[in-house]
Image (tube, rainbow, N blue to C red):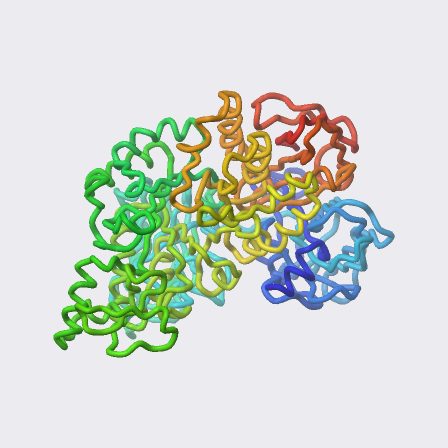
Amino acid sequence: MRRIAALVLAGVIGTSALAVPAEGVSVGGAVPNQTVRNLAVGATATASDSLTKFEPHKAIDGNSSTYWAASNGSMPKWLRVDLGRVRQLTSVEQSFKDVDTHSFLIEASVDGNGWTALLDRRAGTRGHVFTQAVTGSYRYVRLTVTGSAGNRWAGSTEFAINGYDDEPRNLARGVSATSSSLGPGYEPFKAVDGDPTTYWGAEKPDLPQWLMLDLGNDIAVSRIEQSFVDNDRWKFRVEGSRDKTTWQTLMDKDETGRVFGQDLTGTYRYIKLTVLSSGAGHWACSQELKVFGSGEPVTTKWWEDRSGVMRFYPIWQQLRLDAITAQLDTLKARGFRAIELSPVNDGDRDLWAGLPVMDLYTIDPDIGTMQDFEELLAAAHARGLKVIIFTNPGYASINSPYFRKAEDDFRNGVQSPERSWFDIRKQPGDYPEKWHYSERAQGYYWGTWDKKAPSFNYSSQAWLDKARHYLRFWMDKGIDGIALDAPNVYHTSTVEKNNYAITDVLRNYDTFMNGEGVREPTYIYDWHYNSLQDYQITQWGIPPGQGSSAVLKAIDSGDPSGLEDTLKEYRDLMVNAGGITQTAPNWGRVNYPVDGRLLEIAMLTTMGTLFYLHNDYYTILPDEQEIPDWTPEQRAMLDKLMRAQNASPALAPLGLRVRIPTNDDHKYYAYKRLNKDGTAKALVLLNFRNTAQTVSVDLTGTGIATSQTPTDLVESKPGPPISGSTYQVRLPAFGFTVLSVQ
């Protein structure tokens, strides 16, 4: 990671903004009954070379967050796209990560031998997004990067090749997929990834097994196609539903083959495949489950396209669940889109807000009942709010009945599941500071964090299976995500054990998965979490420690020039890996000046992260301890920023951020934001000085129209008009503006 961060993301590579013509726009005239779309999505990309995890296909995946990057800074470098057959083109667009003077050439070919220039910028042109209308029919399109003024490495966030398309559109590609079970490496999303070499596969041969797609919206379905991996006599059915309750059979087969299709008419949001039997005993699978029709499916997850999380510590705060339910309307009006409960199951309230487990399956009696929890879930969902639980399959309370039984069984020489859940020995092993003597057990037990918190034993198959059952229990309640306390240090855990007991279970639900305390991209690539805290921006501390904040450091010095590299070194790595970051203000700096605090929040709510109002140490509760002392105007501005982050898709946690140079980058920070598919744009200007300043940006080549009246997303009114390539805004001390732009 360090090599990538130092050489690539700290400003030496070029990538892109994404702007793709809307799909489904009918084109008349010479090409009737066809649409214009980005033909590169789903095509095949190769490159001269690439960094690990920055492969060429990431330049044509329709996701502005991911990108191809060359493996070194030598030039020239090339990226080639094979459209599969000759296609009639209408335009090409290359997007780099950074605004710079870029030199490059785009060419096209019918056969991969003779090449025609489509866009020649080898002389160098300033900007980061470059579009050219073209005519002609080609199969291959090639980008050759020859240099940049800033000596950035070659790369592309998105290389769009737009043209006429006469093929039916598979509406299932990229939608949410869940399953009854999965085998490691055969996750449900692989049935809808458009890659014929991957597939969903069940965990074991037991049948029936199911795969379910959520198209996100009601879709007028005209055809279903299901492809298995092997030719066999398959018995299966495919059903459709609008509410996931009432199902209609769409396809019912007991035939020999590998690919099966069915034309039909109906409107559905959910499509469910149930595999009932296989003649040769093959395990349930789906190489591709395709859905054809008309409509706009949703291909982003909820944690990728909305932000604003309020964390509660119900046990520590002595806050009953019905009291949280009563706050939901107010929270939604303030701009929150999710709540996190840390934790809710019965825990030891004398340690870490109740995280040490007393009972895995019951609600802590001091905060309510299971019925209260279920009513909270239903009330949140009725308001469009998501519910996350912060939970802990890592350690128990020393007073839990689980550990007490394990102590007794160890002392008495009794083998039991509970005894195997903990690592208890006659003599301590390595790291003696982690081994604690139990008089009751007459032995030593491992406690990673504290002698009052014996660790669960991830070398025990019985515990691994119990953890799986525990997580399924809470997911089956209908929660929208799980955050886990420091899973990287669960006792004797490995990536294989983690995936078996935790993340592969949660991947069946296609849910939010946060690994608190973990920091490396490998925890997304290999451990399969999809959200990590951004400790490069905000590191919480245990009082009296203050933690640290890159943003507050920039505010203190009045110089934000290092923030872009900080974001590239972590946030951008995580979204390229396929995850998101979550970030909160540094409330450990108690009673920080409010104007500076609001500037910090303005950046966090716009930079591209899942914003938490707080996720510091559990004793730090700013909504109770600090914010009530603000003026009404300051509290109102906090709520405006909370609402603004969801007022435009461009400010979503996922998506591209492109720094736009200002008249003084040591005083100001400006950037453009794009959502995942590049259909929404925002311009953010931040003043890090303690006096009013005029901030100027050059919009040349940024993809922002230079004649428009943007919308001020914070104040919900028209912003200062843009009437040329140079845009100036007067900002107050520690001021900011957040604009929706075209």
Q: Looking at the rendering, in which quadrant would you find the C terminus? A: top right
Relative to residue 487, is residue 595 depicted above or below? above
Left or right placement of residue 274 versus residue 574 in this view: left
Depth order, front residue of 728/23: 728
Instruction: Residue 163: give x, y in percent of width and height.
Output: 66, 48
Relative to residue 583, is residue 235 depicted above or below? below
Q: Residue at x 28, y 49 (%)?
A: 350
Q: Is residue 173 visible?
A: no
Instruction: Residue 596: give x, y in percent of width and height.
Output: 59, 33
Q: Quadrant of residue 410?
A: bottom left
Q: Residue at x 26, y 42 (%)?
A: 246
Depth order, front residue of 162/86: 162
Q: Quadrant of residue 152?
A: bottom right
Q: Is residue 470 visible?
A: yes
Instruction: Residue 500: give x, y in percent of width and height.
Output: 35, 66
Instruction: Residue 133: give x, y in percent of width and height.
Output: 75, 44
